[in-house]
Image (tube, grey):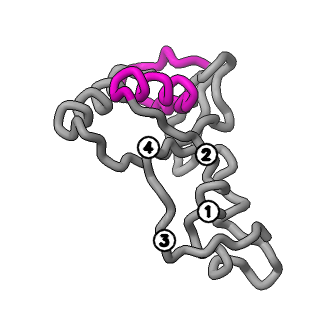
Amino acid sequence: VPTRALLLLETLQRVAPSGAHLILADFDALPDALPGQNAPVVQSKAGGKSVFHSDYLVPIGSADIFHPTDFGSLREVYAQVSGRSATVVSHAEFCIRYADYGKTRCLNGYNPLLEDYMNMTMLLSHWDPPKAHKKRPPP
């Protein structure tokens, strides 16, 4: 887990020791990543187009470097820092449970809320669904 993520969790524990409702969302995998576990994407722009680099050793400031989040490790660190458990769910699972995804379905049946962002994951701590919300079966 990156040091900034650890610092965030430690800060939240310090300012809200009794526990705040926490939702963290990020990408758990990235297309065009370098080889390796949790490897980054190194990308720059040239002529308005994305250029993917085969190495992270590029001149400083010449490219953006994006790392995916390891949510399994993040959940473990959250538990160690806070003493509380957390749940990790996919973006689609989150939307099925909490969103009114019937309103996001296209005429052709495609539902971007459920079918896009397949590489998005969320960490939820102690968050119960709203009482008025009725679960709907997935499409």
Give coordinates of residue 69: x percent, y percent.
52, 31
Residue, disc 2 = 89
Left or right, 126 with respect to 118, comes to left
Instruction: Name the residue type under label 1.
Output: Arg
Q: What number is the disc on residue 125?
A: 4
Give coordinates of residue 110: x percent, y percent.
78, 72
Q: Quadrant of residue 30?
A: top right
At horizontal 44% and vertical 52% (from top left) the residue drawn is 127
Q: Earlier in the sequence, mark 4 or mark 3?
A: 4
Q: From the image, which quarter does the C terminus lie in?
A: bottom right
Q: Nearer the viewer, mark 2 or mark 4?
A: 4
Instruction: Name the residue type under label 2.
Output: Val
Q: Secondary structure at mark 4?
A: strand
Q: Secondary structure at mark 3?
A: loop
Q: Is residue 49 magenta?
A: no
Instruction: Name the residue type under label 4.
Output: Ser
Q: Nearer the viewer, mark 1 or mark 3?
A: 3
Tag 1 and tag 3, C-beta contact below 8 Å: no
Instruction: Name the residue type under label 3.
Output: Lys
Q: Is residue 78 magenta?
A: yes
Q: CA distance from mark 2 to mark 4?
A: 11 Å
Q: Quadrant of residue 11?
A: top left
Give coordinates of residue 109: x percent, y percent.
81, 77
Q: What number is the disc on residue 97?
A: 1
Tell me if mark 4 has few (under 14), some (14-19) or many (20+) residues whose alpha carbon lies within 10 angstroms of its own.
many
Q: Quadrant of residue 51?
A: top right
Magenta region: which residues?
55-83
Q: Between residues 105 and 124, which one lies in front from this camera angle?
A: 124
Q: Earlier in the sequence, mark 2 or mark 4?
A: 2
Q: CA distance from mark 4 to mark 1?
A: 15 Å
